Amino acid sequence: MPELIAPSVRLHRAWLEAHAEWGAGPHEDGFGLGQSDDVGTPAGFAAWLARLAKQSDPAETIDVGRHRCTYRWIVDGDRVLGGIALRDGDDDYVSWAGHVGYGIRPSARRRGLATWALGRMLNEARAWGLDRILAVCAVDNAASIKTIEHGGGVFEGVRDNGTGPLRRYWITL
């Protein structure tokens, strides 16, 4: 049975296995992985998770131009299946990437995990007091389109965000 948990250093090896399945690069949506993050060493991995925890902590002051973001990993036992992020605010990044981003490792796809995780994060968004969230996906990403629409997403339109056209949806909470 899957769970949504805060990122954990105890899952370093499991996260590296999921990362390897995606292939090289920081492209896993929902994990908050940046180009400069060193996830290969225990110290680097712990530093990355500390940054994510700080960005998630409502007691922390967020720098101008940044946004608060809560990260959760989708796990089954000691296996990392994916990640999901919920961003607060209406800054340029949220307008570009949406309030929510998620990714499921290739071997765990087509099992409804993204839809399940999105539903749980919508509950968190409600707890934050948000009335609606923006979800975006590539125009050709049929799986994400289905996930967002199952989550209540209402199609707004397509916008080019500088890296290509994205479908934009609003989910009323």
Image (tube, helix red, strand yellow):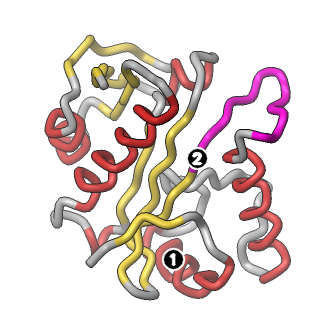
Residue identifier under label 2: 70
Residue identifier under label 1: 20
Q: Quadrant of residue 44?
A: bottom right
Q: Is residue 129 above or below residue 76?
A: above
- Image quadrant containing the N terminus: bottom left
Give, as a three-letter code, the residue at label 2.
Thr
| 69 lies left or right of 164 | right
- Rendering coords of residue 105 (x, y %): 37, 68
For the magenta stretch, what is the residue range? 59-70
Q: Residue at x 36, y 41 (%)?
A: 123
Q: Looking at the rendered structure, which numbered label has been put on residue 147? A: none
For the residues carrying marks 1 and 2, which lies nearer the camera in this image? 2
- Rendering coords of residue 149 (x, y %): 16, 33
Q: Is residue 93 above or below residue 39?
A: above
**Mark 2 Cα shell of 10 Å, populated few (<14), some (14-19), many (≥20):** many
Asked which secondary structure carries label 2, the reply is strand
Task: Name the chief secondary structure element in magenta.
Answer: loop
Q: Nearer the viewer, residue 36 or 81?
A: 81
Q: Earlier in the sequence, mark 1 or mark 2?
A: 1
Task: Check residue 155 for magenta coloring.
Answer: no
Asked which secondary structure carries label 1, the reply is helix
